[in-house]
Image (cartoon, helix red, strand yellow):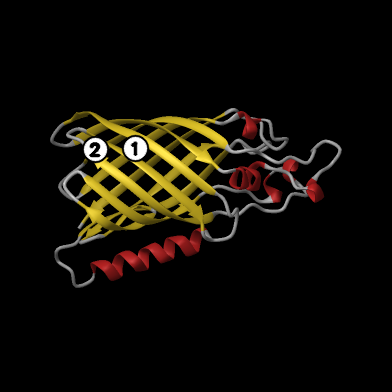
Amino acid sequence: MKKKLICALSVFVMSAYAGNDESSVQMGVGVSSGMSPYKGISSITIPLPDIELNYKSVFVEGINAGYNIYDTENLQLSVMALPVLLGYRSKDSDALKGMDNRHMSIEGALRMKYTFEKSFFATTFSHDVSEASNGYTFNVAYNYTLFETFNQGLSLYAGAEYLSDKKSTYYYGVKAKEATPSRARYDADGAFNPFIGLSEVFALSKTWSMLANVEYKRLDSTIYQSPIVDDRYMLSGYLAIIYRF
């Protein structure tokens, strides 16, 4: 799934960029690393493409792609495709042996974003379209620029996500056939997970820049009480180097 996602994004960006001098394109590579909530897995590190593309109403933000169906100076309404980088393989830890693999998925989303002078507010509703969890997510976030200079900017953001019971159960539940004497069957409820983070962009030159991000997320008790979960929070970081065409 991950390799297919990276290839698809690369083809999408290059086809949108080719022959269009008005395009705004930045491409780079990044590494995402963070704590895993699952028992026996201390951390997860994933290399990812980092793409920033704007051409007319089409855009790519990191690994998310979308189309603005309504776009004014302050308000945007967009349809999007959002990869969900969750899941595990049963061989990842002894605590997960006998579990079915849980796969990354793709969600179709509708996002509303309102931009202020130094900040923006965004709310997103997304639903799994890859038939992995068949669940949905509702996300709200507020991002504020703490300071900005000619070559760097630091932003603070905070918000929360709500995972439907289907999505929570898919990624953190235990099916009847997966239950053991030490791992009871478990169905999760809808989960409310607040988060807060910092993002920094630093321009190395006119064409090269670096992006860094750190985020703290507190997991709902319905996730933490799962027999395959042993962490109440997730701390993650992201670092990328980007080239502007």
Q: Which residue is mark 2?
A: 202
Residue ranking furthest to the right: 181
Residue 165 versus residue 54 in the image, above or below: above
Count of numbered marks: 2
- Where disc 2 sits, the SS reads strand
Residue 195 coordinates in the image, percent (x, y): 45, 31
20 or 170: nearer the viewer? 170
Left or right, 216 with reference to 207: right
Circle 2 residues within 10 Å: few <14, some 14–19, many ≥20: some
Q: Residue furthest bottom?
A: 19
Q: Nearer the viewer, residue 121 or 212?
A: 121
Q: Which residue occupies 55% across, 47% down? A: 86
Disc number for residue 212 = 1
Q: Residue at x 43, y 45 (%)?
A: 31
Above-or-below relation of 12 to 197: below
- Residue at the spot 33% in from the left edge and 33% down from the top edge: 142
Q: Is residue 164 left or right of residue 156?
A: right
Relative to the observer, which residue lies in front, 171 or 33? 171
Along the line of sight, the residue nearer the viewer: 69 or 146: 69
Report x, y in % for residue 22: 14, 63
Q: Amino acid at mark 1?
A: Ala
Secondary-structure class at tag 1: strand
The residue under label 2 is which amino acid type?
Answer: Phe
- Tell me which label, 2 or 1, sits earlier in the chain: 2
For the residues labelled 2 and 1, say whether their Cβ atoms are less than 8 Å apart. yes
